[in-house]
Structures are given as structure tokens and as C-alpha cells.
Amino acid sequence: MELFSNLALGFATAGSPANLFFCLIGVLLGTLIGVLPGIGATATIAMLLPITFQLEPVSSLIMLAGIYYGAQYGGSTTAILINMPGESSSAVTAIDGYQMARKGRAGAALAIAALGSFFAGTVSTFLVALFAPPLTEIALEFGAAEYFSLMIVGLVSSIALAHGSVVKALAMVALGLLLGLVGTDIYTGTPRFTLGIREYSDGLNFVALAVGVFGIAEILRNLESEKTREVLMAKVTDLMPTREDFRQMVAPVLRGTAIGSALGVLPGGGAILAAFASYTVEKRLSDRPEEFGRGAVAGVAGPESANNAGAQTSFIPLLTLGIPANPVMALMIGAMIIQGIVPGPNVATEQPALFWGIIASMWIGNLMLVVLNLPLIGLWVKLLTIPYFVLFPIIMAFCSIGVYSVNSNVYDLYAVAFFGLVGYLLLKLRCEPAPLLLGFVLGPLLEENLRRAMILSRGDASTFVTRPISATLLLLAAAVLVIVFLPSVKKKREQVFVEED
Amino acid sequence: MKSISFDATNALCGGILTAVGIFFAWQSFGLELGTALRMGPGYFPLVLSAVLILLGLTILVQSARVKGEPMGPIAIRGIFFILPAPIFFGLTVRGLGFVPAIFVTALIACFASSRMKPLWAIAVSLGLTIFSVAVFSYGLNLPFERFGPWTRF
């Protein structure tokens, strides 16, 4: 069977000693930084991105993927131990996980989260392997108009899943798209919005923008009020969940995996939504709903499986269409482009080893997390006690080195400072930076496909609605927009995000 | 009569976004616009700027209706010490070289926290410099000059 020979190729690639090593490093680094509160997966990857540039494309992407799962796992650890989710998708875990920890069952909660995640990771990796190839076939049929419409869907969904005001999220997308256009126009070679600075004629550096808006803005926010963190317990014991725990977690894990896999494919960041959906479902199905919020096993197992499954399947749009489903995937696209790989349906046929290697490494990375991190939990807990004022000079230094190492362009460093300020300003103005980053990555692509489609159709804009796939996609985008603006959905959406905060 | 209450954060947000939109629109007019068939370099940005201005104005108008939460404290000290750190690194990495540049960069960032004691700051920066040189310069072989032309007399 083709699937198995492909998977075999993938495991051969990902299983080479060098790639195993980079996967391990990625997972460890990701967990290390993910454990530090206030720095989510996006900021972690943005900061560590430059380290991977010296590597082979396959190793580099495997390591980045490892950082991603690691950071997610680290986020759950802090959510359980100190009620401070390292990132939004583990916010739900904090509700019941922290309560379990307060009852002295932190070890069991961590183990349940890890095992649930591993199971979900295994299933969804298989799903990626199963669904990615047929989707690439479809994607190969895509013309400029379809790509344009698809990106519109992606951008619109990112709005739907952003926190807070929809109008602001829309504005962020527009701003991101504009920032993405800075640089030289591809058709005429005219410099645009460079303010006469020649060093920006290749466009604003993606890493600089991501590090500034996600990394530095976070640091500034953490500096606003320097509180001492309290770690619940210095020692986590009794990792093994009881038989009763196992019995309680099976069904939630299965349901969480299904929900997460389905929602993760949605462009716009399905992992967060998946965790919330799973929590809601578990609470509704439970015969003891009063336990939720007081340390229910299902309240940890379900959402954790869901967010991990969602994290995996969000690779599907990236690998098949070259369209990022969330900011982390946008960073992966940036990494691919820097490595000289054009993301899109051609990756699977032109670079099968890369394509299947990444898929196989997802599973290996998840396995490593379970095997390594449960014993290492003591170390991660110790990390939590490092005072923040020691951490951020280190982060700043690494950011500076990392950004500079991309192109050896000092103007990128000035851009980091500038976007750090912009990111902080956006945070203060309650604007979500994720749609901005997606817009930034998609800006040039969107314009290129729009212009190409218009030339192909001889200036007839109806090409977007007369081509069936394109029309369907635009209809989908319109539907999402309408739904987001519906009063009832709007209210519900606000509730969800309030709970999260 | 009720006094007019408005959300200062959103008003500011809308104002800034509108201003940024106007800036991009103004810049776009300096570029060739072209036609819908053959779009020039200024066409798509101009459309986007128009959208941004529109959204900015919407936020501005909406801000007059509801009163929002205050903006909270602003990390002034953080801004003054964190942001110059990468700029300093950019200005000096070629001239001073990697080792002094990273040391001073870390040192500047250290003072963003009111809790950092000077001695601690030097210790952290020193340790960080040694680690970075070992990992990035010797380990990963990044093409940085360790000591630049400014340090030679």
C-alpha cells in the first residue's frame, strides 16, 4: 500500500540519528521555554526559529515541529501546576488540572494530560498521513483565483477565532497585509513603503516581525507588574494515575481526539477552539457535571487530547495548500521559505522525504514527550522558580542574535525594536496580533494571486465567483463572517473568551 | 443629561489605525495605480488602506457608545531598556564585535526590571556572553567576528 511505503519513507527520514537528535532538542527546548509562563508556543518558535537556519531543511522543520509540541506540553504543565497557562489552548486545562493539583494529585493530572496528548497525537498523525495526499491532488488543480479565495477563507477564519472585537481583528488583517507588501513590487520592481531605506527593499523580515510582536511585546507586558510566582508544589509525586482515573479518561480522550482532529483543520487556529469544545462536551455528557471545575479527570483528559489533535491536524492545510492555519503554522511557512522550499501542494511530490519525514516526526516527537517529560517533570518545576528578571535579558540576547543571524542585516534588529513597540501598543489597545501575522505572511501571496487572476480573466472580477471551487470558498468565507456578526454567536463568543481569561 | 462617556482605549485604537491607513494611502498614491486588469504596484495597497481607514473610523465611532476598562499600567521602564537592547546590538555588532556587543545588550536589558541588582546584572550578562559565544560562535559557527575593528588600537 502506498500509505505504508510513504510512512516507511517518513520514518526512515525522521528516524535517522541526526533527525532524532534535532527532534529531541526541539522537544526539550520547546518544553523548556513553554514552561516559562507568559511565553506561548508562537513566541517560543519565533525566538528559536533562527537556531534552525543552519540545519538541513528536513532537520530544521522537524526541530521546529518538535518545539511546537514541546511548547504545548510545557504550557499544560504550567497550567496544571501554577494555574497559569503558557498559551491559550491549555487555558481549559488549568480549570480542572489546577484543582487536581491542589488536591495533591498534580502528578496524576500531568500524566493524564501527557497520555491523552500522546494518544491524540498518534491518531491525528495517522489522519494527516491519510488525508494530506488526496488533498494535495485537489490543491494541484487550484488556479490563481482559487488560491486567492482560499486565502480569504483563512484570513476570515482567523478573525472568527481571534479574541475580542471582530472589527479590530479585521483591521489587524488589513494592517498585516499592508505590512506584508513592504518591499519591492514583484511585477514592476518598484520599491513600496520602504521610506527610502534600501535595506527594507526585500521586505520586512518575517522573523523580526514575529519576534517583536509576539516575543518582545510579551516581555514588556510581563514587566508591567512584577509579581512573584508561586509554585504549588516543589515535588510532584505519584505520577501513575489510578485504575479509576484510567477508566474515567478513556471516553473523554477518544471524544477529544475526534473533536480536535476535525477542528484543527480549520484555518484560523482550531486547537484553542477544540479544547473549549471538548470541555463543553465532556461537561454536558458527564453524569457528574458538578465535578467540573473541582478537579474532574475528564476535564483534563478531553481538552488536552483535543488541543494536541488539533495541533497536529493544523499541519494539513500547511502541508497540502501552503496556507497557515494559525500563527505557528505561519512561522513554519516562514521557515520553509527561508530554507528555499515553496510551501504548497508541490512539496509532497517534489520532496517526499521532507513531507513524510515531518509527518513521521510528529509521532516521534509526541513519543519523546511522554517518555522524557514525565521523568523530567521535577526539572521543569524547578525552572518555574527562576525569577523572571533573570530570564528576559537572556531572551533579549537570544532574540537579537537570532534575528541578526537570519540575514546579517542590522536593519532587521531595528525592525525588532519597532515591532516590539507596535506589538505592545496593540496589546494595550486590546488588538489581537495573530491575524496581523497571518495577514503579513499572506499579503504578498494574496496580491500576487489577485493580480494574476485578474490578468487571466482579462480584468473581469467575476472570475472569482464563476469558477466553482473559488465560488464555494468565497461563500464559505462570507458565511463565517455572517456567523461571527450574528448577535447570538457574538454573545456566545464573548462568553467563551471571557472564561478563558 | 448623562455626560458623554467613551472608551479611551478604543478611541485611541481607532484613531491610530485610521492614521496608519491614511499614511499607507498617501504612500500608495505616489505609486502607479494601474487598472483592475493590469494592477499597478499601488492598486492593492490603496484598496487595503481604504479598508483600514474605514475600520479605524468604525472603531472610533463605536468607542463613543460604551465605556471600557482602563488601559492598565504601562511598562515605561521596560520600553526604555528592552527596546534599545536589539538596537544597540545592531549598531555595534559589526564595529565592536560579537562578544562586547552581546554583553552590553544583555546588560541593558537587565535594567528593565526594578528588581535586578547591578551585581546580578553583571553576573547574568557575563554568563550569557560566555554561553552565547560557546554555542553560537564556536558551536554553530555563525559568521560573527568575535572582536570587531573598534576594539583594535
Image (tube, coloured by chain):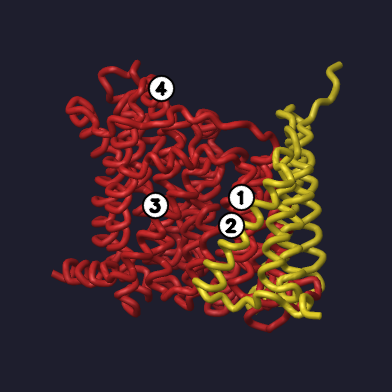
Chain colours: A red, B yellow
Q: In this view, does A340 lie to the left or right of B125?
A: left
Which residue corresponds to mark 1? A433
Please tell me whether residue B151 is drawn above or below residue B47 in the rendered image.
below
Q: Tell me, yes or no, whether dots 4 and 1 are on the same chain.
A: yes
Between the C-alphas of marks 3 and 2, the distance is: 20 Å
Residue A52's spot in the image, x, y percent? 48, 68
Q: Earlier in the sequence, mark 3 or mark 2?
A: 3
Q: The disc numbered 2 marks a residue on which chain?
A: A
Q: Is residue A289 left or right of residue B143?
A: left
Discs 2, 1 touching: Cβ within 8 Å? yes
State which quadrant residue A190 falls in: bottom right
Q: How crowded is mark 2: few (under 14 residues within 10 Å), some or many (20 or more)?
A: many
Residue B90's spot in the image, x, y percent? 73, 68
Front position among marks 4 and 1: 4
Discs 2, 4 touching: Cβ within 8 Å? no
Which residue corresponds to mark 4? A102
Q: What residue type is labelled 2?
A: Leu
Residue at 81% x, 26% y: name it: B5
Residue at 25% x, 19% y: name it: A287
Residue at 24% x, 61% y: name it: A130
Front position among marks 4 and 3: 4
Between the C-alphas of marks 2 and 1, the distance is: 6 Å
